[in-house]
Amino acid sequence: MLCTKRLIVINMRLNHIVIIALLLCTTLVFAQTNGDTTLQNAADSIARLFDIDEIIVTAHKKDEPVIPVQRLEGQRLEGLSTQSVADAVRYFSGVQVKDYGGVGGLKTVDVRSMGTNHLGVFYDGIEIGNAQNGTVDLGKFSMDNIEEISLYNGQKSEIFQAAKDYGSAGTLYLKTRRPKFQDGKRYNLQLVMKAGTFGLANPSVLYEQKLTDNLHLSVNGEYTYAHGRYHFRYRKVLPDGTVAWDTTAVRQNGDVNAWRGEIGFFGYINEGKWHIKAYCYGSEKGIPGAIVNNVWTNSQRQWDRNAFVQGNFTKTFVKGYDFQVNAKYSNDWMRYLNPDTTLMYIDNAFTQQEIYLSMAHRLNALGKQSAFARMRTIPVNLDFSLSADYQWNYLQGNLANFVFPERNTVLLAAATQIYWKYIKAQASVLATFVHDKIHVPTLTTATATRQKPQFTPAVFLSYQPYLKEELYLRAFYKRIFRMPTFNDLYYTDMGNISLQPEYTTQYDGGIQYDKKWQRGVFRNISIKADGYFNQVKNKIVAIPKGNGQYRWMMMNYGYVEIRGCDVNLSTTLDLTHDVLLTVSAAYTYQKAQDFTSPEEITYGGQIAYVPWHSGSATANLQWHGLSFNYAFIYVGERYHNSANIPANHEQPWYTHDLTVAYELPLKSCRLHFAMEINNMLNQQYDIILNYPMPGINGKGIIKIII
């Protein structure tokens, strides 16, 4: 957005003297030959030509997001010890990652304790959907082709976006690499090989081709294999200090065999751009399961086949009016097998399909073409946007008495933003219309649920007290909801078609300060701090139904309040002898309490797996082609149940990771070598109870860039 950074008033009388002096010097020779009369006439002519009014010169101010954002990109992202996107997200404040262990284990993210389903995950600007259970497994997304990861609380800090972008309590954006070519080059090639503990073998290839100056091609493929076995120590200490058991075992059935392929075309047109991408993912993996009742191995397995085609078109048609179209089709198949008949034999397969279409418009009401913009003296920028989305979902399954649900969703979003001197403000309202249809009615589910239209607002404000200082005060309010998933509503003998949406209300206030220096040791410093209060109402939970151990029903039963703060610090130091050190730290305090029922023991307790204190720290040291990366993650004490009793208490855990990398430039290519050591102190810990995580482990990386 355009803001006036400074106004420079030029006194033309002073400029007249300078200009006259310069021109007099150039005409001195002619003055000597033609006499004083010629010189005087030239000076009079110059004075008449340049005797004009004052000139006002304006410049653009650096855009700072109205909404708090955490971002990982470039060398900082590449230097972290990560195998998947979930590993990288751990370094953000306010985030809890539920990791069930191993290379192929399920990995989900919860932001500010509002629940996994309240986080929208976007891949190149289009949301990754899962109408079946609402959960996106971030372990499926590799880091090889990811260029940037951004996390927003509330929504993305711009109004020119699809209606879907307004529809979550928090949003995670995964931006893949867009082809870039150096002068004279028409292709890029990157070959990567990773190998490490757990039997990991992970080759990948990235090829980019400049078909024309305005059309680029990108092809990316990857294969991952790991047997997934690792040693762990399992120790249980009773509340009175007695050791119940202490043993060492090998984690079994954690193997993974997965592949991923992507192909994309990227085009550039006059005042616009477009891209289209096809994505395929397939895997077969074991599910290690929980270690309970002295059972150390499990036989459950899962197969996944995910594919989608998506595209984006963005263009500025006239000055001040922008238009955008998004489209996507996805087909996801999953099979889960539990051959253990001593528990319950299960062989379920599901196929879900999705069609998504979106159009967005943005109008700059005070653009350069408007008469008011030419007349105004106070710098103001005012934008309006309108977006409309349509989404169709359909789920097939082989369960007995399955209803084959279909969902049609229409989203309409209207938003505005204004930048005026010290103030930036955004406001939006989202209207959501959902209608479900059942294709195979049953006795218990004869008709589908039909939700009432929902209207949810959001307001964001940023204030800059001093225009010359990068100091910002900000606040936001947002109310949003999440629809019950197909599993919540229609899962056989468990779903409840009477479920209502689960609502969240967010209040946030924060401060941000950035400073840069051209000289000295400190080159920059950034400080961000936010305090927040969240409410989750109509929380959807599973409660027992009857006396059967496997009989449950979904109910709108819960109410949670979350109070917390996030703090982020980062700085870069330019040390001697071309040594550059970048240090960052993140800290989170959360008090997330369950206020569902005063009669229950869980009332007022910290909700499951939410620590009071957590944080991370990273340091990157660079010297020419050599770099050292250190990462520390800490998760404080917590409970694995909202009943905060000693039997449910979980000890804190922490890990130290180190990466050493060296890049060797050659004539025709660059060679990149890296060695990672994770959990260097061999910490034995569980993120989820009875799912032990690996101890010390490592990985070697060789990358060839042509």
Image (cartoon, grey):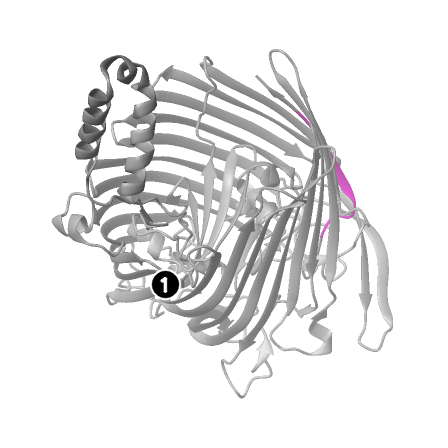
> For residue 485, what is the image quadrant?
bottom left
The residue at the point 46 percent across, 57 percent down is 68
* Residue 214 visible to an observer of this rendering: no
Q: Is residue 694 magenta?
A: yes
Q: Which residues are magenta?
A: 693-702
Q: Identity of the amino acid at label 1?
A: Phe
- Residue 101 in the figure: left or right of residue 411: right
Q: Is residue 267 left or right of residue 604?
A: left
Front residue of 169/141: it is: 169
**In the image shown, does 267 or 454 lie closer to the viewer?**
267
Q: Main secondary structure of the magenta part?
A: strand
Screen quadrant of the C terminus: top right
Inspect this view and state whether residue 43 appears: yes
Q: Which residue is mark 1?
A: 460
Residue lying at 51% horizontally and 59% vertically, measured from the top left: 512
Question: Magenta includes 290?
Answer: no
496 w.r.t. 74: above or below = below
